[in-house]
Amino acid sequence: YSSYLQDGRYRFNVTVHALDVSFFKFAMAIISPNVLLPAFATRLGAGNVLIAFIPSIWFIGLFLPSLLSSYYVEQLSRNKPYLKVSGFIQRLPWLLICIGIGLFLPHRPGVVLAILTAGYIASALASGVSSSAWSELIAKAIPQRIRGSFFGLIGFLGNGLAIAGGLLVKWIMQSERFGYPANYLIIYASISVLLVISYVFFLLNREPILSKKLAPERHFHRYIGAALRFLRSDTRFKWLIASNVLMHANLIGSAFFMVYGLKKMNLDDSLAGGFITFSMVVSMLASLGLGRLADTIGHRKSLIISRLTIVAALALILFVRDWRVLYLVFSLQATQQALNLVSSSSFVFEISPEGKIPTYVGLMNTITAPFLLAFSLIAGKIANSFANGYQVCFGIGLGASVASTVILFFLRDSSPQNATP
């Protein structure tokens, strides 16, 4: 493994992993859980509770099965064969959604809404069972000293491609040539093609093999017991989880950014593509610099900046009534997500004991998942119960994000002896 790091073989993996994730991000940017997906679900007749769930569904599916899958992943000497299967399952639902749109719209929108919801959940769960294995694969394949730059490169490429996607969405939604539902059919067909390209690049990666791997715990109940002992003994990790949970509470407010524009500011669906494009331009231009910044100042400080951007987004939409502020709101949200991509996993990699990255990723994700479910229920209930429900949601998200930032400010940076290679 040391020769892999020293002779430059990792550069090929940097390239194919960056292209895999970039095309995946391209597809996810078009899907856009914060913009296009809520707009499509609203068109299909979804209520506020489901709309509030949409951004959280991905995170719940991503996080909930993570600890269970990490138990299996820690027994593997290689992660790629496992990820071939889970990655295929992760991408398949979007093709099925595309087929459902072609078969059932415009006459049976309820059926399409059910397919969309089920497919989105299935893809999210497949992402969840992949997360621990993918995290360990990346920790092995990408040297620590360039991880921030690597994730910044992903942000740059992914957002650059997503700009084209935003322009495509805007053109399709505004074009008289593509009426409803043909516009959404074309969009979801494009998503399916992009996910196939992403999968091809993933298949090209060459997984390095560690010279030694700690003996895994063969019994699940003993594995869980050992994981909980890590949690009890690592105070910094416990506070990082608390900060992470509070950060995700911003979804109580940010889930309604687009819906607030549609319902309270009387905006047209066609503006969704414009919001995507503008926010992706900002994120693309910032990503390379943000990656290098994280490598320089450390991933904890990078995460603090990430939290501050979502604080600013929620404050703006709460106190400014001009619809044009949504361009800045979505730009700040995109920047927060880019910074989170650069530093969230990298900081966990750094503080994880040797050989325990899947366990730490699994603990972080699985503990967070129930809170995401609760946040979604709270958001939908508040939005339906108050005349100014959206503003109340924005205020709660703002307070939680401020608390998350304060916790991170008092955490210490990772120790070199705990850092992965």
Image (spheres, rainbow, N blue to C red):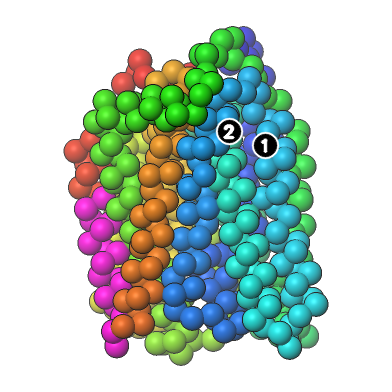
Residue sitting nearer the eye, 38 or 285 = 38
Residue sitting nearer the eye, 62 or 278 = 62
Q: Decide: marks 2, 1 in contact (CB < 8 A)? A: yes
| Mark 1: secondary structure | helix
Horizontal side, residue 37 vs residue 328: left or right: right
Distance, label 2 to label 1, CA atoms, is: 7 Å
Graded by Cα atoms within 10 Å as few (under 14), some (14 to 19) or many (20 or more), the crowding at tag 1 reads many
Instruction: Point out residue 387 in the picture as x, y percentages from the top left corner.
Output: 29, 88
Residue at x 34%, y 47% (from the top left corner) = 244
Horizontal side, residue 185 vs residue 35: left or right: right
Up the image or down, 338 lies above or below 412; here it is below
Q: Amino acid at mark 1?
A: Leu
Q: Earlier in the sequence, mark 2 or mark 1?
A: 1
Residue at x 38%, y 44% (from the top left corner) = 367
Magenta-span inclusion, residue 159? no
Instruction: Point out residue 57 in the picture as x, y percentages from the top left corner.
Output: 50, 60
Q: Quadrant of residue 322?
A: bottom left
Q: Magenta residues: mostly which secondary structure?
A: helix
Q: Which mark is residue 149?
A: none
Q: Quadrant of residue 211?
A: top right
Can you identify the residue that label 2 sits on?
Answer: 133
Magenta-span inclusion, residue 389? yes
Q: Amino acid at mark 2?
A: Ala
Q: How many marks?
A: 2
Can you identify the residue that label 1 sits on?
Answer: 83
| Residue 255 makes an appearance in the image | yes
Residue at x 36%, y 71% (from the top left corner) = 379
**Magenta-highlighted residues:** 386-404
Figure quadrant of the N terminus? top right
Residue at x 56%, y 64% (from the top left corner) = 32
Residue sitting nearer the eye, 370 or 152 = 370
